[in-house]
Amino acid sequence: MKLAACYIVRNEAKELDRSIHSLINAVDELVVADTGSTDATIDIARDYRARLFSFPWQDHFAKARNFALSKVESPWIIFLDADEYFLHPKQVRPAIQDLLEGESDAEAVMLVRNNIDIGNEGNRLPYDVALRIMKNSPDLRYQGRIHEMLQKNGHTPCLRYADERLTLIHTGYSSGLDKRKIQRNLALLKADIAENGKNPSHDMYLSDCYFSLQDYRSALLHAMEALDAGLLAISAQGSLYHTAIESMRQLGMPLEDMLALTQAAIQNLPDLPEFYGERGMVLCGMGRLEEARKMLETSITIYDKGKINYRQGSYFTDSVAAIVCKRLGEIYRLRGDAEACRHWLRRALDFDEKNPELQALCRELRM
């Protein structure tokens, strides 16, 4: 099996070097399409003996990706962003071979991405799932100016899911994400809608943009439109529910409405811990503490299993687990159960010892 690596890049020398280094021993061909770099990006590609092509930037990610795809000769392609790299470089080729031998009808493969905030001491952000391996076929092409999606003659290709050996690290998201970039993304989405009409995937990405811009009413509107349309986009449902619930919280909407949405999320995504936690927090706000306790403990029980859902992303991280455990400690404190209170606060510290509110509470209790 011949395997290619493919990139579209612009001024990403450091990121590209790290990314290519993580897969270069696994591939037989390297294709890089540059869209106007002025740094050392092109030199890095040449150092790795890439087949290098120039593509003038046209504010259209799908066109750039499809141009790069047209230059690949190998039958299978790893198409990464420059700010992504494999966690287990030595496992890349054997893992792909194992997967494709067992899934002969596969046309594209989804990989888990662990998102890292390099601007905040490398803190781990929510993980997600992204399509990064595909068959080299002329009927598999990207669509969309931004947040482009791989399509087979206008439909979703036959997808398969990789195991932990093909886990990616992604450094492109950060707590300091530039609002200018978000505004650019929003403009490209609107241009794509004007050209091609709106579909539920547009609503998904619009909700994300508006949420980042703190326009919670618009974020909620588009998240609910995507969910109501039955959007089953890969890794999308969890983030849509999260955006909708948090937007409702920011807008001060009725707790009963939030509670109903958390129940819908649990019914659709029962293996994810976050919506049990969300439901528990809403129940706390309603004064239903015993029900809240059960939900919050369920969320930690699921998280403790450490099982990654390879078909859905999750925003439940150690810092979120610490908040849940802290709330459980507070509930048990109200119940007069000092031992259980200390147990959950110790667990919270294990998850996030730097949380200032948690530190203050532990000092108050002389822990």
Image (spheres, rainbow, N blue to C red):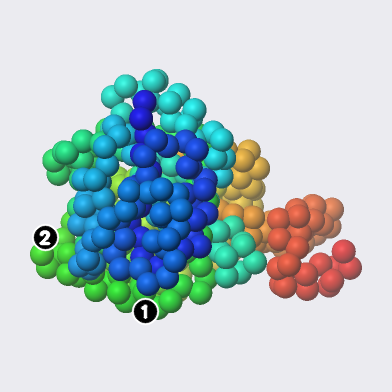
Secondary structure under tag 1 reads: helix
Q: Is residue 232 above or below residue 126?
A: above
In the rendered image, which residue does mark 1 sit on? 180
Q: Which residue is depicted at the point 28% across and 24% down?
A: 105
- The answer to whether residue 325 is left or right of residue 282 is right
Q: Percent from the top left, x then y, of residue 287?
A: 58, 63
Foreground tag (1 vs 2): 1
Q: Is residue 178 above or below residue 278?
A: below
Q: Percent from the top left, x then y, of residue 345?
A: 77, 58
Q: Which residue is depicted at the point 57% across and 65% down?
A: 118
Q: Quadrant of residue 29?
A: top left
Q: Which residue is depicted at the point 30% across and 68% down?
A: 36
Q: Which residue is depicted at the point 24% across and 74% down?
A: 187
Front residue (pair 210, 10): 10
Q: Alpha-carbon neighbours of circle 2 within 10 Å: few (<14), some, or many (≥20)?
A: few
- The answer to whether residue 119 is left or right of residue 16 is right
Residue type, mark 2 in image? Asn
Q: Quadrant of residue 39?
A: bottom left
Front residue (pair 265, 59): 59
Q: Percent from the top left, x then y, of residue 323?
A: 65, 61
Q: Percent from the top left, x then y, of residue 33?
A: 30, 56
Q: Is residue 261 visible?
A: no
Q: Earlier in the sequence, mark 1 or mark 2?
A: 1
Total marks in image? 2
Secondary structure under tag 2 reads: helix
In the rendered image, which residue does mark 2 sit on? 196
Measure how far apart labels 1 and 2 are at the Cα level.
24 Å
Which corner quadrant holds the N terminus? top left
Q: Is residue 32 visible?
A: yes
Front residue (pair 47, 359): 47
Residue type, mark 1 in image? Arg
